[in-house]
Image (cartoon, rainbow, N blue to C red):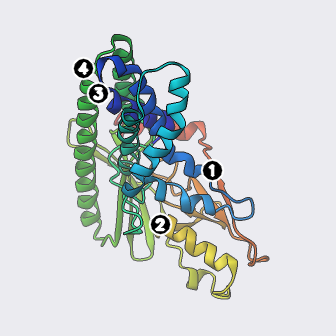
Amino acid sequence: MDILTHGLLGGTLAQSSSRKEETRAATAVGFFAALVADADALIRSSSDPLLTLEYHRQFTHSLIFIPVGALLAALVLWPVLKRFHVTLDFKRTYIYALLGCATSGFLDSCTSYGTHLLWPFSGERVAWSIVPIFDPLFTLILGAAILLGWRARNTLPARIGLLLAAVYLSIGWLQHQRAEGMIRATIAQRGHDAAKLTVKPTMGNLLLWRAIYRSGDIWHVDAVRIGLGAGQVYPGTTAPVFNLSRDMPVLAATSVLYRDIQRFDFFSDGYLALHPEDPALLGDVRYAMLPTSVRPLWWIRLDTKDPEAHVQFEASRRMPSEEVDRFFGMLRGKD
């Protein structure tokens, strides 16, 4: 989830549990503490671009890190609060920081990106795919609640905001189930067997969903719009499944390029295909600007001339005006 929404959820939860005289301090502590987990974005290497992908949403987003992250946040904030004459002892500061930190891994697990919530006990990336990575309505609910509670020094708006946020996530879960059911019916009508299937909301809404499934050695990408009615499937495009041993048979298994492809394959949960416009680019087909397209949002560059160099990680959010029109047409349910 975006960093603002992280802070708002952490601040709202801390505010909802605060004493009247501590409402504003609790909100600030919870907001800051909710951002501590995303400090993993600072783990990077100029020579190994994939390093940041491996560590983002990893150990700092795990359940076991919550008390540690809260302690770090409290140690940073308590001296600051004392300097501004805020009467909040260290124990209360830690409690509010704990509440803020507790929201980070959970919120990211609600998206489709995936979070190592159970690290180090499991390497699985938990991704429930019930809310977009950026959702202005969800952010607005939390923002309105936290501001009202801040101004009134009252916990009621925060509690109402958390309730509405929970309802919104529940709607996302319901929409996910409906979209998955609809695409499974479509898969059956096509006579396909879905070896892998991912259904995820598109950016900023819970109406239009992107579905990616594998049938044989082909990725199929479709859009599913789920409104109040029966719903609608928008047939998309296809791409061959990338197979390392088949598509790059002469690449040595001991090379850096080979290992980097495996690392990117793990990050992408196996959803790999060559870029439709450039076979030197290997993309993650789970993500694209247009929900019916196989043109990926990000990829790695395959330089077979220098297999001992780390791959370059690249991304593009280019969306031609024609695709923008198609996106909003599908969002409105047009044929």
Question: For the residues marked 2 and 4, what is the alpha-carbon distance in whole angstroms?
Answer: 44 Å
Question: For the residues marked 1 and 4, what is the alpha-carbon distance in whole angstroms?
Answer: 36 Å
Q: Amino acid at mark 4?
A: Leu
Would residue 103 appear left or right of 274 to someone viewing this image? left
Question: For the residues marked 2 and 3, what is the alpha-carbon distance in whole angstroms?
Answer: 40 Å
Image position, residue 128 (x, y; %): 32, 53
Q: Nearer the viewer, residue 156 or 283?
A: 156
Picture quarter containing residue 278?
Answer: bottom right
Image position, residue 192 (x, y; %): 31, 71
Q: For the C terminus, which image quadrant?
A: top left
Q: Amino acid at mark 1?
A: Leu
Q: Amino acid at mark 3?
A: Ser
Question: SS of the residue at dot 1?
Answer: helix
Q: Nearer the viewer, residue 90 or 294?
A: 90
Question: SS of the residue at dot 2?
Answer: loop
Residue that numbered label 1 is attached to: 42
Image position, residue 133 (x, y; %): 44, 43
Which mark is on residue 271? 2
Would residue 136 appear left or right of 333 to someone viewing this image? right
Label 3: few (<14), some or many (≥20) within 10 Å? many
**Is there CB contact under 8 Å for labels 1 and 2?**
no
> Which mark is in front, 2 or 3?
3
Residue drawn at (40%, 20%) of the image: 24
Is residue 129 shown to the viewer in this render?
A: yes
Question: SS of the residue at dot 4?
Answer: helix
Residue that numbered label 3 is attached to: 16
Residue that numbered label 4 is attached to: 156
- Name the outermost residue toward the top: 152
Residue drawn at (24%, 20%) of the image: 156
Question: For the residues marked 4 and 3, what is the alpha-carbon distance in whole angstroms?
Answer: 7 Å
**Label 2 vs 3, first from the N-terminus:** 3
Question: For the residues marked 3 and 1, what is the alpha-carbon distance in whole angstroms?
Answer: 31 Å
